[in-house]
Image: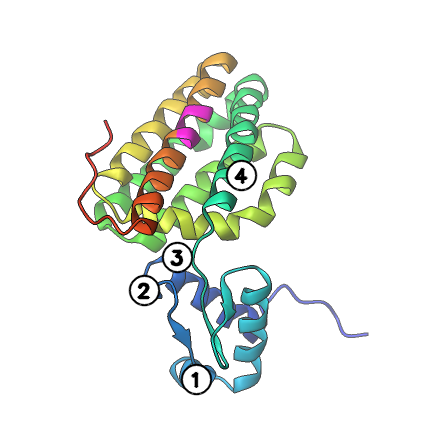
């Protein structure tokens, strides 16, 4: 047997590149993906590209195109609702447990995560904002002391990246998100589980409301801008 390695395979790297393009809005719905073009752009053979495309199709990010090939799949509204409903519950639980069990870790490491998020906000980089957001929430899962929270949510983060990318490219959303993150962290640091859970649930519910509203309007063909959320 070969020694195991933690290094990502070429197919995984290609998959990550394509997913980043989708999450960042650079590959829109129904965009056709050409294996040869991707392989040439990334400087790899067709095999890892083919493997990556099949994986993304199985995960629901791509779908078969008319005739042949693959296109970026439209986002399913029902799936979005279901996912955010589940996430609101798990996020609230993570915040509650973090305030009960992880106060010391929150005080020590939490402010640095907020600082990183604010920096990404100033830079206006969607990829950095998504990475910082994921890091903050994974930190809450870690200090909650319940390993099943991260294990349960992990399979869905790949989809959440796409939804977050859409939300983060709008209005003043990044600033509001990090204001909410900071409020959650402060509730955890103060050891207030009720407030932490309330803020955690509200944070996810607000993100879901904004995104689902925009998605509904997009599917209805409406183009006029929404009012900014307060």
Label 1 crowd bin: few (<14), some (14–19), many (20+), radius 10 Å = few
Q: Which residue is mark 1?
A: 43
Spot occupied by residue 6 in the image (x, y as percentages of width and height): 63, 63
Q: CA distance from mark 1 to mark 3?
A: 22 Å
- At horizontal 27% and vertical 38% (from top left) the residue drawn is 173
Q: Nearer the viewer, residue 206 or 98?
A: 206
Q: Which residue is mark 2?
A: 26
Graded by Cα atoms within 10 Å as few (under 14), some (14 to 19) or many (20 or more), the crowding at tag 4 reads: few
Q: CA distance from mark 2 to mark 4?
A: 26 Å
The reply to whether discs 2 and 3 touch (Cβ–Cβ < 8 Å) is: no
Helix, strand or loop at disc 1?
A: loop
**What is the CA distance from the residue labelled 2 to the residue labelled 1?**
19 Å
Q: What SS does tag 4 mark?
A: helix
For label 4, the residue is 82
Q: Is residue 215 above or below residue 90?
A: below
Which residue range is magenta in the image? 201-205
- Relative to 21, is 172 above or below? above
Q: Earlier in the sequence, mark 2 or mark 4?
A: 2
Mark 3 or 4: the one toward you = 4
Mark toward the start of the polypeptide (1 vs 3): 3
Residue hosting label 3: 23
Cα gap from disc 1 to disc 4, whole angstroms: 38 Å
Q: What percent of the width, then of the height, locates residue 186?
A: 39, 20
């Amino acid at each position: 047997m070969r020694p195991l390695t933690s290094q990502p395979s070429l197919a995984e790297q290609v998959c990550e590149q394509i997913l980043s393009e989708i999450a960042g809005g650079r590959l829109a719905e129904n965009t056709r993906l050409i294996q040869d073009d991707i392989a040439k752009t990334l400087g790899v053979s067709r095999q890892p590209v083919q493997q990556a495309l099949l994986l993304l199709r199985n995960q629901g990010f791509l779908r078969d195109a008319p005739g042949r090939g693959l296109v970026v799949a439209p986002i399913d509204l029902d799936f979005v609702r279901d996912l955010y409903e589940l996430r609101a519950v798990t996020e609230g639980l993570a915040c509650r447990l973090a305030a009960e069990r992880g106060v010391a870790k929150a005080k020590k490491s939490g402010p640095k995560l907020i600082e990183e998020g604010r920096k990404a906000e100033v830079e206006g980089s969607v990829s950095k904002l998504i990475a910082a957001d994921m890091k903050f929430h994974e930190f809450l899962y870690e200090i909650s002391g319940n390993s099943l929270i991260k294990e349960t949510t992990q399979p869905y983060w790949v989809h959440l990246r796409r939804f977050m990318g859409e939300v983060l490219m709008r209005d003043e959303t990044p600033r509001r998100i990090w204001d909410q993150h900071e409020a959650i962290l402060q509730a955890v640091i103060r050891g207030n589980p009720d407030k932490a859970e309330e803020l955690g649930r509200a944070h996810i519910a607000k993100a879901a409301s904004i995104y689902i509203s925009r998605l509904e309007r997009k599917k209805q063909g409406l183009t006029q801008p929404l009012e900014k959320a307060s």
